Amino acid sequence: LCTREYFRLKQRNRESVMEKAVRPVQFVPETIRADILFHGMKKSRNHFAVVLDEYGGMSGIVTMNDLLEQLVGDLEDDETAPIEQPPIEVIGTATWRIQGSALLVDVEKATGRQLPADRYDTFSGLVFGLLGAIPKDGEIPIVEGYGLKIEVEEIQDHRLQKAIVTIIGERD
């Protein structure tokens, strides 16, 4: 159903809608190349297609947006997408909120502390190394090391999402 055509209709009875606003479905095999499908969709002005497996069963639906993202990368046009937080956020003069994925060399620069960047690539690696284990989801451990107090805020899917880091002995 082409919604633009549907809302332009003066009469919205079944016959009129079927004739003027409904377009035929485009079926494509799972094995079709993205560039070929893209050009076909562009030519037919059809913005989605039903993907069929080798047995003729429905495998899914592919949209023009899906194809564009495969060809050129993520478009991030969704208004509901969460705003990405910076890996290191300054909260006070000696306090930061740090994402687990933050590079340890960047954490070193932000905190001014010498950290074992030769042993760990990320802040998460450092925290798990100090804890000696990977906490369970929902746990909020606190650990100290390298002159830092690290209060884990969130563990999700066995990954450190974020933590509050404070230099020991300094206050904001």
Image (tube, rainbow, N blue to C red):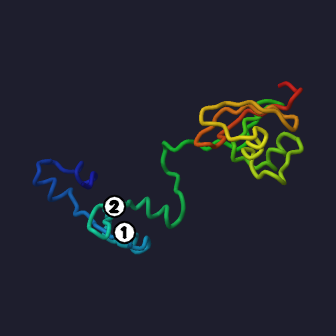
* Labelled disc at residue 30: 1
Residue at the top extreme, as displayed: 171
Element type at marker 1? loop
- Quarter of the picture containing the C terminus is top right
How many marks the image carries: the answer is 2
Residue at the front extreme, as displayed: 132
Whether tag 1 and tag 2 are in contact, CB under 8 A, the answer is yes
- Quarter of the picture containing the N terminus is bottom left
* Residue at the spot 48% in from the left edge and 42% down from the top edge: 80
- Relative to 68, is 39 above or below? below
Residue 41: image quadrant is: bottom left
- Relative to 172, is 130 above or below? below
x, y percent for residue 74:
53, 57
Residue 42: image quadrant is: bottom left
Q: Which residue is mark 2?
A: 59
Viewer-closest of 102 and 71: 102
* Residue at the spot 81% in from the left edge and 31% down from the top edge: 149
Label 1 sits on what residue type? Glu
Cα separation, mark 1 vs mark 2, equals 8 Å
x, y percent for residue 58:
29, 61
The disc, 1 or 2, on the residue closer to the chain's N-terminal end is 1
